[in-house]
Image (tube, grey):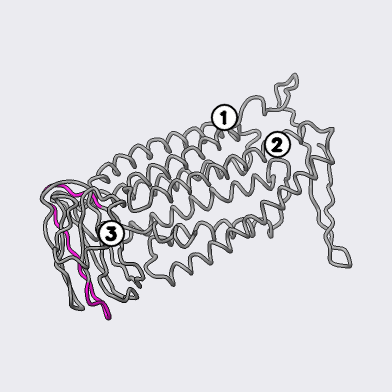
């Protein structure tokens, strides 16, 4: 499943791919052409003798059986659409096919392997260009999407900042993380906006801007995943003491999960897919382990402190936030994967992913935005009286190597 996910998440209007084909038909990512656009295919192979390429408008998978018979047909024309583009039947190791698309529309590249033996290896480079832009016509809206998102995250940042400054008496570190996270997101969106504008006119946007985007995305997503784990572990909610090892495990597991998203655009072979897949599995299982341990500890605390409504409310807040966030991110990832298939445009997958991430930002505000009801009681002099009930979890190792968890409660 993950192997398939990593394959479909990497595509663009300029693509270089290597195939070890066992299929008769290979369908590439479709592209939105404007009138009088151009296309270019370059194929280099070692053992491929007969191949045909179609560029079909409004392709329907139900027509695949007709395509499978094209190799046995003497007629090179496939009666599917009057605007289709068809290459000649290639019988050589190197082949270049280029031309123009006279009618605007969404075209799907189809490669048909006419070899008797389907075990063929070949490299293909293809490039699509619209007359006024290098972008897919469906992706022309992407700059406006990023401007709108930049405005939304600016509002989120200002809300967190104003909320923290107005409630300095009981500010907690996790609130600071929520305030910092939109900053990295805004920087990433700013440079992504520049890159989309640049990609309209050039195939090689500034590499340093892409590096800035990757770094900011890494920091943003690492904070996002780390905060969920910290909240699940109860830090600054119902636990005030955390060891260096606890911080190390949360940060490292979150970073391993995040780095996979950053590496996806660089995937260009099966080996790179396997490398990213291994990192993903390590980070995922490590992260699940930490969350399961936190769930067990919070359940034990709830059992031991039935007469403490404040502690109960804090733990329930923490658990509700973690469950909501994980569900939101899972649905976001699922939607992103589905819309990143060859049928949808980049703009569709971007809207799907960013909608889910912004909903997660709203959940952060919903659960952790400071309110007056969180403040302590005030005495006659107007000073805030804060009563803190703290639960510390201590682990002991028995002589036989098993663990015992002790709950220490005190109030001040």
Q: CA distance from mark 2 to mark 1?
A: 25 Å
Residue at the image point whose x is 55% and y is 34% from the top: 365
Q: Is residue 36 magenta?
A: yes
Q: Nearer the viewer, residue 300 or 193?
A: 300
**In this rendering, position of residue 202 left or right of residue 224:** left
Locate residue 242, reporting x and y percent. Answer: 71, 52
Q: In which quarter of the view is residue 47 placed?
A: bottom left
Residue pushed farthest top? 380
The segment highlighted magenta reads 31-50
- Majority secondary structure of the magenta segment? strand
Quadrant of the frame with the C terminus: top right
Q: In which quarter of the view is residue 250 placed?
A: bottom right
Binning the other alpha carbons within 10 Å of mark 2 as few (below 14), some (14 to 19) or many (20 upward) gives some
Locate residue 59, reporting x and y percent. Answer: 26, 50
SS assignment at label 1: helix
Quickly name the residue at label 3: 206
Residue at the image point whose x is 62% and y is 59% from the top: 285
Locate residue 8, reporting x and y percent. Answer: 39, 57
* Residue 305 higher or lower than 3, as above or below: above
Quickly name the residue at label 2: 316
Binning the other alpha carbons within 10 Å of mark 3 as few (below 14), some (14 to 19) or many (20 upward) gives few
Q: Nearer the viewer, residue 44 or 271?
A: 44
SS assignment at label 2: helix
Q: Earlier in the sequence, mark 2 or mark 3?
A: 3
**In this rendering, position of residue 206 left or right of residue 316:** left
Quickly name the residue at label 1: 166
């Amino acid at each position: 499943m993950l192997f398939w996910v990593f394959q479909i998440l990497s595509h663009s209007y300029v693509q270089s791919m290597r195939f070890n084909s066992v299929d008769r038909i290979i369908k590439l990512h479709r592209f939105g052409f404007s009138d009088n656009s151009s296309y270019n295919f370059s194929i280099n192979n070692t053992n491929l003798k007969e191949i045909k390429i179609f560029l079909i408008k409004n392709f329907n998978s139900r027509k695949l059986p007709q395509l499978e018979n094209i190799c046995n047909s003497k007629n090179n024309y496939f009666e599917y659409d009057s605007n289709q583009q068809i290459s000649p039947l290639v019988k050589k190791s190197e082949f270049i096919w280029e031309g123009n698309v006279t009618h605007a529309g969404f075209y799907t590249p189809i490669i048909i392997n006419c070899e008797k033996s389907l075990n063929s290896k070949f490299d293909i480079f293809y490039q699509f260009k619209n007359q006024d832009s290098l972008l897919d016509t469906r992706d022309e809206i992407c700059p406006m999407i990023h401007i709108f998102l930049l405005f939304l995250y600016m509002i989120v940042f200002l809300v967190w900042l104003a909320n923290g400054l107005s409630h300095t008496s009981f500010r907690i570190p996790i609130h600071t993380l929520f305030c910092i996270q939109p900053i990295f997101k805004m920087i990433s969106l700013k440079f992504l906006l520049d890159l989309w504008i640049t990609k309209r006119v050039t195939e090689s946007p500034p590499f340093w801007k892409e590096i800035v985007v990757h770094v900011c995305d890494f920091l943003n997503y690492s904070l996002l995943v780390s905060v969920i784990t910290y909240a699940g572990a109860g830090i600054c909610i119902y636990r005030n003491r955390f060891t260096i090892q606890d911080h190390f495990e949360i940060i490292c597991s979150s970073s391993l999960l995040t780095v996979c998203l950053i590496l996806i655009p660089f995937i260009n072979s099966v080996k790179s897919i396997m490398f990213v897949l291994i990192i993903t599995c390590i980070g995922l299982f490590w992260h699940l382990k930490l969350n399961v341990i936190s769930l067990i500890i919070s359940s034990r605390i709830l059992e031991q402190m039935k007469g403490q409504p404040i502690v109960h409310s804090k733990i329930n807040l923490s658990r509700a936030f973690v469950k909501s966030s994980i569900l939101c991110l899972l649905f976001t990832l699922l939607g992103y994967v589905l819309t990143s298939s060859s049928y949808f445009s980049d703009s569709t997958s971007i809207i799907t992913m960013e909608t889910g991430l912004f909903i997660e930002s709203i959940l952060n505000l919903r659960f952790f935005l400071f309110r007056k009801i969180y403040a302590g009681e005030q005495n006659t002099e107007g000073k805030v009286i804060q009563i803190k009930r703290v639960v510390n979890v201590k682990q002991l190792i028995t002589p036989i190597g098993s663990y015992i968890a002790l709950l220490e409660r005190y109030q001040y």
